[in-house]
């Protein structure tokens, strides 16, 4: 059974990396007709500054909020293709916001991180305005690949949250799957286009003062050749409260598709995520 599961994961991971069409198919397989409770909520004026909000099936009590940021090398991505991620977390009792954000070449660093911080600031306000939907208090950030970078960087550099009258006390924790946190010099096309001549002291989480960082769960696959595991290892070494989990033989997509409900679900990823949330951001039982 384990061999069959690994084979299925490898097959779907390969399909996932082929392109957006396969991601659409994967999302459809995992989420079916699952749709946002509220779609295309504007958190800014730009066309891509919109987010979807998913609430758990039981709406009788407010739910703690996870804000999820997808990856895509900062030049691709679509919130509509991540309903499967929302479903995973809403099934656990969480509300989930998934924002789109502006991409290369329309913008470059730091604009895409600013958009993500704007989305978090918007949801902080939404939380206050809708106490019947969202639990009051800090929010949880989570993301995969470039999205994990955005989540970490907006907290590592206080300027991003500070622009929306927020600080680290508004963040309960960060879950980063296969994130790049230590990639200077920019030696691949995606980082060159996204960051240009930005100095490492401004762009790299590992170059920041991390003493203020909230609890972090950093998951990486040992077979990841897109974002090497050293990124998560180095950040875990420097952050004051970071849990590092390495998934044997998992590639870059493997940590993400593990959140799926069918075929690709992987307890090696899910169990640490569930334990981290239970410890730092539990769902309160009615």
Image (cartoon, rainbow, N blue to C red):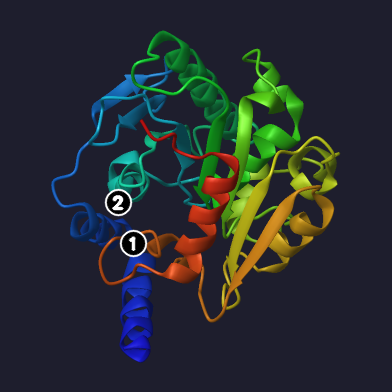
Mark 2 neighbour class, 10 Å CA radius: few under 14, some 14 to 19, many 20 or more = many
Q: Is residue 90 above or below residue 168?
A: below
Task: From the top left corner, tell me how far across and down residue 268 is, in percent.
Answer: 49, 70
Residue 83 is left or right of residue 199, and the answer is left
Residue found 65% across the figure and 55% down from its top: 180
Q: How many marks?
A: 2
Front position in the image: 66 or 42: 66
Residue found 70% across the figure and 52% down from its top: 181
Task: From the top left corner, tell me how far across and down residue 131 is, in percent.
Answer: 40, 14
Residue 42 is left or right of residue 263, and the answer is right
Which quarter of the figure is the N terminus placed in?
Answer: bottom left
Q: CA distance from mark 1 to mark 2?
A: 17 Å
| First in residue order: circle 1 vs circle 2 | 1
Q: Is residue 183 above or below residue 112?
A: below
Residue 170 visible, this orientation:
yes
Residue found 35% across the figure and 30% down from its top: 286
Secondary structure of the residue carrying numbered label 1: loop
Front position in the image: 237 or 105: 237
Front position in the image: 101 or 197: 101
Front position in the image: 30 or 64: 64
Mark 1 neighbour class, 10 Å CA radius: few under 14, some 14 to 19, many 20 or more = few
Residue annotated with mark 1: 19
Task: From the top left corner, tell me how far across and down residue 104 is, in percent.
Answer: 51, 40
> For residue 29, what is the image quadrant?
bottom left
Judge depth for marks 1 and 2 and give the one in front: 2
Identify the mark at residue 265; answer none if there is no mark: none
Residue found 53% across the figure and 46% down from its top: 277
Residue 185 visible, this orientation:
no
> For residue 21, what is the image quadrant?
bottom left
Task: From the top left corner, tell me how far across and down residue 63 is, in percent.
Answer: 39, 30
Residue annotated with mark 2: 84
Secondary structure of the residue carrying numbered label 2: helix
């Amino acid at each position: 059974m384990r061999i069959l599961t690994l084979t299925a994961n490898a097959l779907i991971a390969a399909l996932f990396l082929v392109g957006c069409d396969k991601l659409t198919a994967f999302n459809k397989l995992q989420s079916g007709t699952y749709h946002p409770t509220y779609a295309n909520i504007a958190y800014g004026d730009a066309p891509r500054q919109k987010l979807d909000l998913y609430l758990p099936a039981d709406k009788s009590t407010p739910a703690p909020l996870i804000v999820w940021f997808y990856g895509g090398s900062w030049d691709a991505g679509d919130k509509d293709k991540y309903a499967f991620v929302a479903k995973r977390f809403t099934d656990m009792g969480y509300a989930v916001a998934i924002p789109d954000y502006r991409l290369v070449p329309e913008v470059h660093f730091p604009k895409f991180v600013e958009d993500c911080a704007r989305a978090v600031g918007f949801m902080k306000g939404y939380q206050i305005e809708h106490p019947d939907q969202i639990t009051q208090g800090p929010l949880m950030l989570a993301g995969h690949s470039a999205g994990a970078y955005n989540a970490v960087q907006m907290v590592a550099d206080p300027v991003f949250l500070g622009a929306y009258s927020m600080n680290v006390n508004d963040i309960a924790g960060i879950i980063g799957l296969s994130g790049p946190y230590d990639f200077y010099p920019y030696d691949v096309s995606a980082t060159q286009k996204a960051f240009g001549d930005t100095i490492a002291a401004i762009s790299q989480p590992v170059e920041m003062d991390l003493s203020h960082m909230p609890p972090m769960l950093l998951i990486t696959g040992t077979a990841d050749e897109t974002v090497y595991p050293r990124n998560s290892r180095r950040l875990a070494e420097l952050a004051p409260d970071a849990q590092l989990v390495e998934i044997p033989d998992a590639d870059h997509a493997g940590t993400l598709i593990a959140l799926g409900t069918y075929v690709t679900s992987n307890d090696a990823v899910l169990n640490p995520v569930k334990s981290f949330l239970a410890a730092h951001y539990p769902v309160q039982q009615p």
